[in-house]
Image: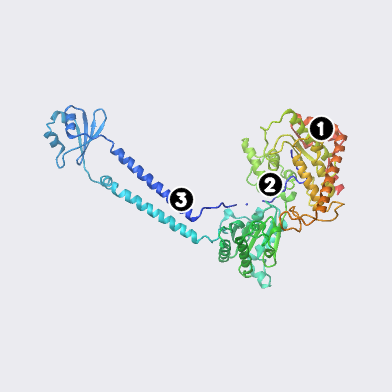
Amino acid sequence: MKMPLNKPKRIIITKSSKGGGTSPGQGIMKQAFMALVIFLLLVSLYSLFSDMSKSIEEVSLSELTQEISTGNISAIVVTGDKLEVTYLDGGERVSKKEAGTALTTTLKNYDVNKEALSKVNIEVKNDQGFLYWFASLAPIFLPIAFIVFFLWFLSRQVKGAGMQAFSFGQSKARLTTPDDKSQQVTFKDVAGCKEAKEELREIVDFLKNPKKFLDIGARIPKGILLMGAPGTGKTLLARAVAGEAGVSFFSISGSEFVEMFVGVGASRVRDLFDLAKKAAPAIIFVDEIDAVGRVRGTGVGGGNDEREQTLNQILVELDGFEPNEKVIVMAATNRPDVLDPALLRPGRFDRRVTLDLPDRKDREDILLIHARKKPFAEDVRIALIAERTPGFSGADLYSLMNEAAILAARESRTKVSQFDLIRSIEKVMLGPERKSHILSKREKELTAFHEAGHAVVASVLAYADPVHKISIISRGRVAGYVLKLPLEDRKLQSKKEFLDDIAVALGGYVVEKTIFEDLTTGPSNDLQVATALARDMVTKYGMSEKMGPMALESASGKPIFGLGVGDKEYSERVGAMIDAEVSKIMNDAMKKVEKIIKDHRKILDTIARRLVEVETIEQKEFEEILVAHGITPKKKKDIEHQV
């Protein structure tokens, strides 16, 4: 059972990969095999039709004369020496006459009755023309033509494989030209990122008018590093810079440089930079540059000679740029902490642009961009959706709008309503509803009390986010959930807020333990989240009085000084102190929750019984229950007073 804590989901402003291929030798064998199969198939078809043409029964000339005399023959077609005989019953046979002798003469020599012969329709065809010669020569020339075609096809594939071998070290970058309006993106298509766009406008200005900078002795940065969480729009922003400047845009992923052959990556880097210089002014964009730009010499991340040679070549190419070449290198990563220091020094990627998650106004602008081609009903309020999606990225907001349109289309409606958008928020955060996942009576009751415990604790504690929805309908991998959303966007989080979040996470655990006097696997995710928060307070944020102002782990959860995986720069004694502090925070939070559950047992029972009946309680109904039991719902002014 899952309950989103603090930040329901991290969100981003508004990515492509290539699978591995086969080697040239494998391609030749595959093409040769296919050509051989086609050749054998054509020969088999020809043989089949040839056999079918020979399956007609042949009769002797003497038998034919007897059949004519008895009146069993209706027609005879004469083609050279060949006779095609049609019987009265519709049957067909073939025969041959004497060479150089007319059929009528032959029949007279066999004493055929003139009266019987007059009843037979005799037609003489000239054995000349295209079809005659084709039928005569096809058995000879068609097999020869098939063999010639097979040899030509095979040589063509060998030649193509040879060319692939020569082009193995060429760049695989995708080029978007300024004339390609269908792929063009400008700053108008990128909402939010105000500071990032301002930082990049001078890059656009340089690409449009480099003389203004060069005349005053200024040198534009050679490399721009875009940093931010996944989905914040790093690739989209790079394309927007190229679209605004109207220059060629070469895009490639960092993983596309690295191959199993040493030196190929460096060769592709050289080729990419040569192409960009020829197309200048241009932008080279390397997505996920951490695939080749990791710290060298640590052995972490699968380091090998090929990756390091590729990185060395990138460093050399960046140093080799002249001020007037008008080529800008942009790169994107969500792991700037693992990049090699040589890549980040002045003169290379010396300008770093950070893309944060969008705030409420930015989310509204992003939603409006994604809503351009979607018909909306009159009740749609984009501002409300922006308020209910804190922590969402641009990519999440795109998915939200798309899911809302899919929900409306699935129900055969022509417009997207507010209800579709509200439902799509939960679908993006937690997954689709699992209506087929039916709980037993006891499981349903236990789930209702579990989620009610989260909701009651969140409503009582002063620094917990207000509850917007409670549900015991399964979504994704959770059996029920409590949707908590902050009243306003927060960039900082205090110790008191952390402690209240941990207490809210333990609400379901304490309810199961105290009311049902048993524990299930339901609170497992809650315990993981709460324990992780408590450990971060101690090891990252210095929020432990006993440990003091010490940062023992980095933001990635690894030791702050250690380079190797699993290394620790603190002693076992300090590790035991950390464990003790984490345990103390968890136990103090559990005691606080036990008191809240005991003091507010009536409201807990009321919410749980209502959940069993209706399965979902929205914010309005939940606040009415709170007011009825003497609890005042949190409002924005209360949060401002706390701050």
Q: Nearer the viewer, mark 2 or mark 3?
A: 3
Marks 1, 2: nearer the viewer: 1
Q: Amino acid at mark 2?
A: Leu
Where residue 160 sits: x, y (%)? 45, 57
Q: Residue at x 41, y 49 (%)?
A: 35
Q: Secondary structure at mark 2?
A: helix
Residue 573: where, in percent of width, then height? 83, 53
- How packed is label 3: few (under 14 Cα within 10 Å), some, or many (20 or more)? few
Q: Is residue 432 left or right of residue 621?
A: left
Vertical arrangement, residue 443 with respect to residue 167, above or below: above
Is residue 163 or residue 353 the one in the foreground? 163
Q: Position of residue 113 (x, y in %)?
A: 13, 29
Q: Which residue is mark 2?
A: 397
Q: Position of residue 427 (x, y in %)?
A: 68, 40
N-terminal of the two: label 2 or label 3? 3
Give the mark nearest the N terminus, 1 or 3: 3
Q: Quadrant of residue 473?
A: top right
- Pick the quarter of the image with the N terminus: top right
Whether 106 is drawn above or below 139: the answer is above
Q: Which residue does the image show at 85% across and 46% down from the upper left? A: 584
The residue tagged with tag 1: helix, strand or loop? loop
- Please state which amino acid type lies under the numbered disc 1: Glu
The residue indicated by pointer 3 is 30
Residue 541 shows in this picture: no
- Mark closer to the chain start, 1 or 2: 2
The label on residue 517 is 1
Nearest to the eye among marks 1 and 3: give it. 1
